[in-house]
Amino acid sequence: MIVSQQKPFEEILDYLEGEERVFILGCNGCAEASGSGGPAQVTEMQSILEENGKRVTGSMVIDFLCQKALVKSRLRPRTEQVEAADSILIMTCGLGIQAVAASVNKVCHPACDTVNMGGSRAEWKGKERCLECGECLLEYTGGICPLTACTKGLINGACGGASNGKCELDPEKDCGWELIYERLKQKNQLDKLRKFIPPKDYSKMMPSPKLMSTSLWALEQIDHEEKME
Amino acid sequence: MSLRSALESGKFAITAEVGPLKGTDVSEIEEVAELLLGRVTATNVTDQQSSVMRLGSLATCHLLKEKGLDPVFQMTCRDRNRVALQSDMLSAHVLGIENVLALTGDLPSLGDHPQAKPVYDLDSVQLLWAINRLNEGYDLVGNELQGKTNFFSGAVVTPEADTEAKLELQLIKMEKKIAVGAKFFQTQAVYDVGTFAKFMKRVEGFKVPVLAGVIPLKSVGMARFMNKNVSGVFVPEELIDKMAKAENKVATGIGIAANLIKELKDICQGVHLMAIGWEKRVPAILDAAGL
């Protein structure tokens, strides 16, 4: 699950300056769940754009704009509408916007900002987060990740900035280290806190160059096909 | 006498904090330096205090050193990664700076550039460890240095806490800091000597000198602000009352700070004065405390 939110409308209008006709694309995946680019938002965007003097040549909501093969096959019957537009306004996450831009030879404008979820891969109710750091420290911290539970991501103990167990950044947020302390105490493992954790190898947090701009999906082969226009 | 020799010989140490201003005008710092010369053992220079961008600690330490003071180079982990931190340590050594205080550092979101990317590549414990490595002649990955450092390194601790977890976490972290090389501690501001004495009892066995933090009260508003917003600072109502009733706030503020110092003198190894704008009044506070 990738969470996105719509950009301020003024920003979107700025992008469209000097253009008259636009084609709108939404996504039935994460963007619909985020309420940033599902069918309802696409319809709303269409009427706001028209109120602001733009002509919408067509709009479409595709399941998973991040899937280039799907984008191409679904857009094929709408080629005329896409061609009639000066640009495409894409209402989804950064992956979807990039996938459409790579699939269609048209100016593509982002309509959404992708929000950092701090290590969450889902929108389930739950505080657990994983930063995929490549050097799991949960052994020492009672199963609570200090990189995500502590605002500063400290790994050798609390900073001293908490008040009544809450982080100094946000009175709603628990101090991650106080949670770790209570958890370890409950499990009779407070000695774990005495271990000195040497500096992390943050290079392990960088994605492997092999994975950086590629997808493991076999369907990517379709990339070799010519672009739609 | 340097901070190192004072603390190693068991002499009561007085450190005063100097906060660089935003900009290149150093006349204020030079003026404060003249006033502190001969009155304090060492002078701490804050590192972008409260995450507000200002003149750097390293350059300011150098200025103070030239004026004859013994500077304590404060280093936070907020703005530099391990490469820059180690490099700045080497630079500090070359400039003759002998003391360093390792801190994690406030979050950028609390300062005047909240858009900044926080670093925290190392934490304060790891920074102390890094300083120790440089003192031994090696960098963090084990490369040998051509010429090592010789820092007297310190750390901070907050002696008062509002939860059991917070106090225990502070004590455990203090021990970790000592294990990786911290030779002295400076504390968050103390107003309740009784609570501080209990803390000192608990850290007695650590055998590391502790300099109690003293922030002179300037007004009732300041006291209430700290109680509300500064973690680990608890100004008792009694002192707030005293400030409220005072006709001469400056004299009363100085008097309260001097009294605290007198009471603290017998239970710890030094005091650390954080005057926050009252740097020029530090001599008056020390006079009143009989130091």
Image (tube, helix red, strand yellow):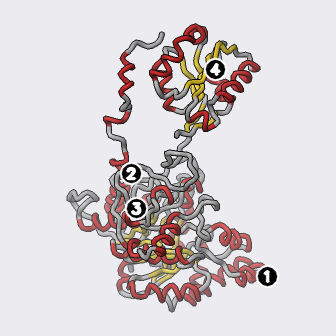
Question: In the image, which disc is placed on residue A138?
Answer: 3
Residue at image position (74%, 20%) is A52
Q: Amino acid at mark 2?
A: Cys
Q: Is residue B113 visible?
A: no
Label 3 vs 4, first from the N-terminus: 4
Name the residue located 69 percent from the left edge and 68 percent from the top edge. B225
In the displayed structure, does residue A82 sit left or right of residue A51? left
Marks 1 and 4, how far apart at CA: 64 Å
Q: Nearer the viewer, residue A210 or B235?
A: A210
Q: Are marks 1 and 2 on the same chain?
A: no
Q: Residue furthest bottom?
A: B266
Q: Nearer the viewer, mark 4 or mark 2?
A: 2
Residue A129: mark: none
Specify few, some or many for label 4: CA neighbours under 10 Å numbering under 14, 14-19, or 20 or more. some
Where is residue B39 drawn, in percent x and y?
50, 79
Per the image, label 1 sits on a secondary structure element best described as helix
Comparing labels 2 and 3, the label whose residue is closer to the camera: 3
Disc 3/disc 1 C-alpha distance (Å): 53 Å
Chain letter behind tag 4: A
